[in-house]
Image (cartoon, grey):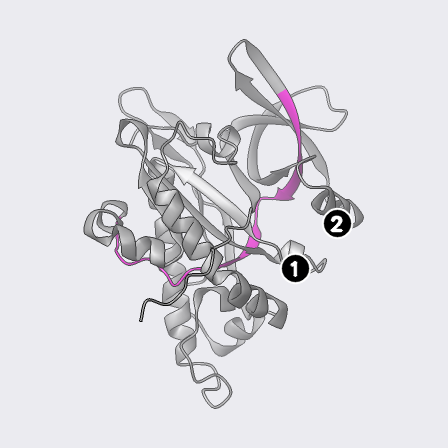
Amino acid sequence: MIGRNRVQVVTEAITLQYANGKSMARPIGGKRFTPYIGFHIEVGRDDELDARLGIAGIPQIEIKHQRQGGAEIVRHWALGETILFYPVTSGPVAQTVAGSLGRNAAATAAAGIGLRWGINDRSRMAVRGYLDLLVRVEMARLVQLSVRSRMSDVLLNVLLDHGRVCEAADHLIDRSSHPDLVTFHELALPLGPGEEEEWGKGETTTVVPFKSLHPAQIDRDYIQRIWRPESVHQAALRDWAGIQAWASEYALQNDERVTGERNDVVETSHEIGR
């Protein structure tokens, strides 16, 4: 039987960015720009998002973007150095970026992880999910965290560590009420700054990559504290097919194509040789 296809809809996601200390920012009305570390979302890209974050009292900052012909100052919502993120993915299929591509490229996309080689063989990676901050203001909409080059290794390691916690949770939850495996979106992934590192070949630069803030020892109380609300679970079930379609498309894109991603703060601040 030939059957009949349904058109897949790829939902646009809110762009979540992370500054690793190379970006310069200042408070609104401030005079001096200083190195900034933390997560942020650009102001003025989504009216509903701006309204919800404004009501929630999230502060704004100005970030200086280096452009051809001069600098541009752009307002962003400053989410702070740490966030809770519910990643919607079935998890990495390999321990390394290179191992996740090649013969595993299709499996990586099917897992809901966007990954490809970009210009000069620099990897580009992205994952989608929900911010706890937005869920708390009843806005369970997808956000996308995109990185490249060495930050792809960082993001992959973060997801691998989250998988470790999900596996631990399998043995700690009430199996009578949750017989299935604990999936990635069912636990909040805490992200925050790691230690300062020197990156680059020859002339190096100091960066502060993000890392998983999960503790080494996982117990039942911790799993209960980071367990997802029902709204996140329902949103993940709703969005999963679209996330897989997006990841497949992401793997086939090239860096010259306009994708809707911002390539400034997250990308250029991480553009340090592998």
Q: Please name the amino acid that badge 2 sits on.
A: Arg
Q: Please name the amino acid that badge 1 sits on.
A: Val
Dot 1 lies on which element? helix
Q: On residue 166, which mark appears?
A: none
Residue at point 41% right, 64% down? 4
- Can you name the residue that lies furthest to the right here? 55
Compare residues 86 and 26 and report the one nearer the observer. 86
Q: Looking at the rendering, in which quadrant would you find the N terminus? A: bottom left
Q: On residue 52, which mark appears?
A: 2
- Magenta includes 225? no
- Spot occupied by residue 169 in the image (x, y as percentages of width and height): 43, 75
- Whether the residues at callouts 2 and 1 have beta carbons within 8 Å, the answer is no
- Spot occupied by residue 105 in the image (x, y as percentages of width and height): 27, 50
Residue at point 43% right, 42% down? 195
Q: In the image, 37: left or right of 114?
A: right
- Spot occupied by residue 88 in the image (x, y as percentages of width and height): 47, 60
Q: What stretch is highlighted in magenta?
A: 73-96
Q: Does residue 196 lie above or below 216 as drawn?
A: above
Q: In the image, 14: left or right of 161?
A: right
Q: Where is mark 1, residue-wise?
A: 135
